[in-house]
Image: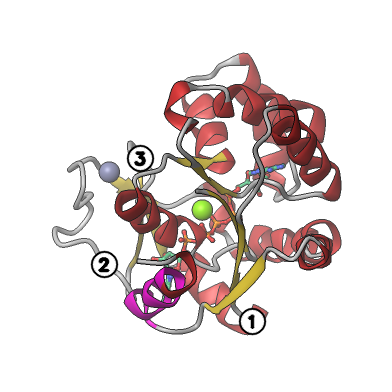
Amino acid sequence: MNIILLGPPGAGKGTQAKQISDKYNIPHISTGDIFRKNISEKTELGVKAQGYIDKGLLVPDELTIDIVKDRLSNVDCKNGFLLDGFPRTVKQAEALDLFLEDKEHKIDYALLIKVPESSILERMTGRRVCSKCGASYHIKFNPSKVAGKCDICGSDIIQRKDDSEETVQERLDVYSRQTEPLIDYYTSAKILCAVDGTQDIDVVFENVCDILGR
Ligand code: AP5
Ligand code: MG
Ligand code: ZN
């Protein structure tokens, strides 16, 4: 099963992705996580990406598309994959379609997690993430069992630099300008499915499983 997750920053893409990846046994590929790993390791890609990410802007398509093609060529994607945070522009979506077509594959579901802008700021400023495995927590809605430590791998959990109020606003603007057009793109392709992301995390996941099958 090949799935992409769509939705504004803070919609809960990463949160749902972890559970989907476990249940359906497909790798979770988050371009945001890939960039953050490269930033922390100070690779050439990380250095290039950091300036954009810290400002809340998108990393240029040329850089992003090649990374995803590389990652999808890995053997673990043979039986499916879950893309979180890619594609984010029509150009990325077209490049992905071409790449998959070449391999006689396609996207089965474009899952849109819908959350209104008014709920997002509280989610983002209260978010904490694992510095190692990328798991997402929230100080109020989804705290870790031991304060400051990841439930999954025990590493420290930290606040993302781009989760400040000002940067979140910029990310929301970028989303509506550059990423929202993908809703029409995947509606036309007849693979868009939407879930209400304002419900409890477990209820959102139930809705997702209703769509994907159990
Ligand atoms: P990325 O890391 O993808 O960030 P994003 O899309 O802005 O999304 P987030 O990770 O912020 O939110 P999420 O939807 O995963 O929510 P989460 O589950 O954490 O990208 C970061 C940057 O990298 C971009 O700005 C860009 O610069 C660059 N980039 C990445 N991909 C790119 C691409 N393809 N092209 C170009 N540039 C790219 O949840 C948020 C919070 O809410 C958490 O605290 C969580 O615990 C809580 N929460 C989740 N669900 C619920 C719920 N149902 N109820 C209550 N709280 C909830
Ligand atoms: Mg995320
Ligand atoms: Zn962890």
Q: Secondary structure at mark 1?
A: loop
Question: In the orientation shown, which residue stands out farthest toward the front?
Answer: 104
Asked if ligand 3 lies within 8 A of label 3, the reply is yes
Does residue 128 show up magenta in the picture? no
| Quadrant in the rendering for residue 182 | bottom right
Q: Residues within 10 Å of mark 2 (few under 14, many from 20)?
A: some
Task: Look at 40% across and 43% down and name the residue there.
Answer: 26
The amino acid pointed to by label 2 is Pro
* 39 relative to 6 in the view: left or right: left
Q: CA distance from mark 3 to mark 2?
A: 15 Å
Q: Secondary structure at mark 3?
A: loop
Give the residue number, with chain letter if any, for mark 2: 143
Magenta range is 200-209
Give the residue number, with chain letter if any, for mark 3: 131
Give the residue number, with chain letter if any, for mark 1: 116
* 90 relative to 126 in the view: left or right: right
Query: Considering only order in the chain, which callout, 2 or 3, is on the residue closer to the N terminus?
Result: 3
The amino acid pointed to by label 1 is Pro
Q: Secondary structure at mark 2?
A: loop
Give percent across and percent down for residue 27.
Answer: 42, 39
Q: Is the residue under label 1 in contact with that under label 2 (CB below 8 Å)?
A: no
Task: Look at 19% across and 52% down and name the residue there.
Answer: 151
Name the quarter where the C terminus is drawn: bottom left
| Quadrant in the rendering for residue 53 | top right
Q: Residues within 10 Å of mark 1 (few under 14, many from 20)?
A: few
Q: Identify which residue, 10 or 19, lies in the foreground.
A: 19
